[in-house]
């Protein structure tokens, strides 16, 4: 039996015990390497050389992508990037419920829940089985049952999935897959970027060409081979090659595939839906000299709000002739157009050339070091939680703790894990210790503040039901810490508002200003908008209160929610005639100028 010793962190915090009845429950200590780059924590058990080259190429890719597809970056929690180079580690991160098999071959995984994300890459495998074994023509030099893995492109794929996952509302699965494939095919050098260009469908890989030549020689009298050489694994091809002589998927079925469907989860290789998504998105963005771009934009926007039907599709893809007569495209019409584009693509790709003397900057050298057992247990454990393997995750998380590790980041992860498994007494102790150790984990501080808020609600410190100053401080202090750490969480602002609504003292202008900031960041959270308006009024920021109430009245659903904002706006004091600019912030909805 192995029992953890109680090791207090700080003078008043007694940490929980973990009791392990069998040492086999704990994973053996492992050797990994650790590094950070902006936005990522890297854990790798591949060679340093492989890791450094992969990350260098990845950082160059990120810079090139920022040129051709600039996206506003809001600070986020670091993403865990786990590079599995030996020991078969990748298989343990395949999400539960996704059975392995011929049709479910994987080389990478993107895992996400809430604001936590992880990318896991299989650097150990060089090829994947994607189809049942079949007889290939030796003259082709290819083995179509095997897919060669480009590890760089797999990392690019999962990174773009991460970027797209931040879209609210989420974009359709077919659009995400089409964009992923376009971006994966981007060519870039320090002075040159090529985006949206298609390969020659008649090209073959160098290895397949060599095998084909050897097999051709073997068929002559000069050579006496007992059997042709095995074909080289096929490479992931552009749609112009992958969809040759293949019937396309009907569009009603094509658009109905969602993010969790097998076709979307496992898009590698001979995946008709994935390649058709590539072809459709490429044609609409770059094909036929921009003919479809405007209609495509309308279609995407409507696809995020309503079910896709052929009627809706025809309303978007509706092209008037010279006489102004409308000609809506049916699903069948679009499939005919798409077939023609696949076979004879007419399109405009994008090229970017650096100005004289300019080029993409070289990434800083990656600084690798041995990972601590806390880092290994925390990063692996939380990735396993995201993959749905709770038992394995628990073992990884508690192993370094039982062995004496007390890193604040590990304690925060343990606190969040215990809370997720309904062990809040233990969770609170871990979170108090993590906060005392100044962990960088805003969701941990938010959860700790929620515990303190629940205590105050259960037993208010004042006879009128309001919170005492001490209770207010116990809630607000961890929330202030959370505000100083990325990412911004709507729950932090909401709990601040709830807490100040229970404050007997008059709201301070700086407190109302924080809530106003939160309302600007999260304009869809109407409860936050409402309470921020009340507290701005209490702080004598009357114009700000009116602007929040007016926004709520414009955007809240009809009925009681909207009427609530209208009543609030009507009962607010009138805006003073002369208000100093610094005291009168105006609320602007997203996109307002």
Image: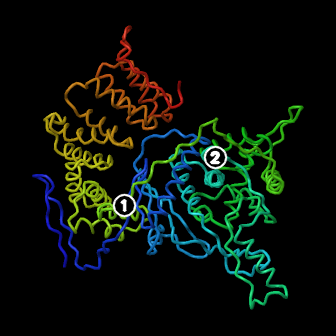
Residue under numbered circle 2:
303
* Tag 2 secondary structure: helix
Tell me the SS state at disc 1: helix
Q: Residue at x 45, y 73 (%)?
A: 86
Please identify, in this view, whether the residue under mark 1 or under mark 2 is nearer the observer: 1
Image location (x, y in percent) of residue 84:
46, 67
Query: Contact (CB < 8 A) between labels 1 and 2?
Result: no
Q: Nearer the viewer, residue 197 or 17?
A: 197
Q: Quadrant of the N terminus?
A: bottom left
Q: Which mark is residue 560?
A: none
Asked if residue 486 is positioned above or below residue 371 in the image, the reply reads above
Q: In this image, 258 relative to 25: left or right?
A: right
Residue 174 location (% of width, % of height):
64, 54
* In this picture, residue 159 sits left or right of residue 210: left
The quadrant holding residue 571 is top left
Taking the spot 20% from the left edge, 51% from the top edge, the residue there is: 432
Query: Horizontally, is 99 left or right of 462 in the view?
Result: right
Residue for badge 1: 379
Q: Marks 1 and 2, Cα distance to the nearest angstrom?
A: 36 Å
Residue 297 figure quarter:
top right
Residue 10 on image: x %, y %: 13, 52
Mark positioned earlier in the residue sequence (1 or 2): 2
**Which residue lies at the image location 81% right of the left edge and 39% below the top edge?**
319
Q: Which residue occupies the foreground of this view, 104 or 518?
A: 104
The crowding category of the residue bearing disc 2, from other C-alpha atoms within 10 Å (few below 14, some 14 to 19, many at least 20), is: some
In the displayed structure, 92 sits above or below 585; it is: below
């Amino acid at each position: 039996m192995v029992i953890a010793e109680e090791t207090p962190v700080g003078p008043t915090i007694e940490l929980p015990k973990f009791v392990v009845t069998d040492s086999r429950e704990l994973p053996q200590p492992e050797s990994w390497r650790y590094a950070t780059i902006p936005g990522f924590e890297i854990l790798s058990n591949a060679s340093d050389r492989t890791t450094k080259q992969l990350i260098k190429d990845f950082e160059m890719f990120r810079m090139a992508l920022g040129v051709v597809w600039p996206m506003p970056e809001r600070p986020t929690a670091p993403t865990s990037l786990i590079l599995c180079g030996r020991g078969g580690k990748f298989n343990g991160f395949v999400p539960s419920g996704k059975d392995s098999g011929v049709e479910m071959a994987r080389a990478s995984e993107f895992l996400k829940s809430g604001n936590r994300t992880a990318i896991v890459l299989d650097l150990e495998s060089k090829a994947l089985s994607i189809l049942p074994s079949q007889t290939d023509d030796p003259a082709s030099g290819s083995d179509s049952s095997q897919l060669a893995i480009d590890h760089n492109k797999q990392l690019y794929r999962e990174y773009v999935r991460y970027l797209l996952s931040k879209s609210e509302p989420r974009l359709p699965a077919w659009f995400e897959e089409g964009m992923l494939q376009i971006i994966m095919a981007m060519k870039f050098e320090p002075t040159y970027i090529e985006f949206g260009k298609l390969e020659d469908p008649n090209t073959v890989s160098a290895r397949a060409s060599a095998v084909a030549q050897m097999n051709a020689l073997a068929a002559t009298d000069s050579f006496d081979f007992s059997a042709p050489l095995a074909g080289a694994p096929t490479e992931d091809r552009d749609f112009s090659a992958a969809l040759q002589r293949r019937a396309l998927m009907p569009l009603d079925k094509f658009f109905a595939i969602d993010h969790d469907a097998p076709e979307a989860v496992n898009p590698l290789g001979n995946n008709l839906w994935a390649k058709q998504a590539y072809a459709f998105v490429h044609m609409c963005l770059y094909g036929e000299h921009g003919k479809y771009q405007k209609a495509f934009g309308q279609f995407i926007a409507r696809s995020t709000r309503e079910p896709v039907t052929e009627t809706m599709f025809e309303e978007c893809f509706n092209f008037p002739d010279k006489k102004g007569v409308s000609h809506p495209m049916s699903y069948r019409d679009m499939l005919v157009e798409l077939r023609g584009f696949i076979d004879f693509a007419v399109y405009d790709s994008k090229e970017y050339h650096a100005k004289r003397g300019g080029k993409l900057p070289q990434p800083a050298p990656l600084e690798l070091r041995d990972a601590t057992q806390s880092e290994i247990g925390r990063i692996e454990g939380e990735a396993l939680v995201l993959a749905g393997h709770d038992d394995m995750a628990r073992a990884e998380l508690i192993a370094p703790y039982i062995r004496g590790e007390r890193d604040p980041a590990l304690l925060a992860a343990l606190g969040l894990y215990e809370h997720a498994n309904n062990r809040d007494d233990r969770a609170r102790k871990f979170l108090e210790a993590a906060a005392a150790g100044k962990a960088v984990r805003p969701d941990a501080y938010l959860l700790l503040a929620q515990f303190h808020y629940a205590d105050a609600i259960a037993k208010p410190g004042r006879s009128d039901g309001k919170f005492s100053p001490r209770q207010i401080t116990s809630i607000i202090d961890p929330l202030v810490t959370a505000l100083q750490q990325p990412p911004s969480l709507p729950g932090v602002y909401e709990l601040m508002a709830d807490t100040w609504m229970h404050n007997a003292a008059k709201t301070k202008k700086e407190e109302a200003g924080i809530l106003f900031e939160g309302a600007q960041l999260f304009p869809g959270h109407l409860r936050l908008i409402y309470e921020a308006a009340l507290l701005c009024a209490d702080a004598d920021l009357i114009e700000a209160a009116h602007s929040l109430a007016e926004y709520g009245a414009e955007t809240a659903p009809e009925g009681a929610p909207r009427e609530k904002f209208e009543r609030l706006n009507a009962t607010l004091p009138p805006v003073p005639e002369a208000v100093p600019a610094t005291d009168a912030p105006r609320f602007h909805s997203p996109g307002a100028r």
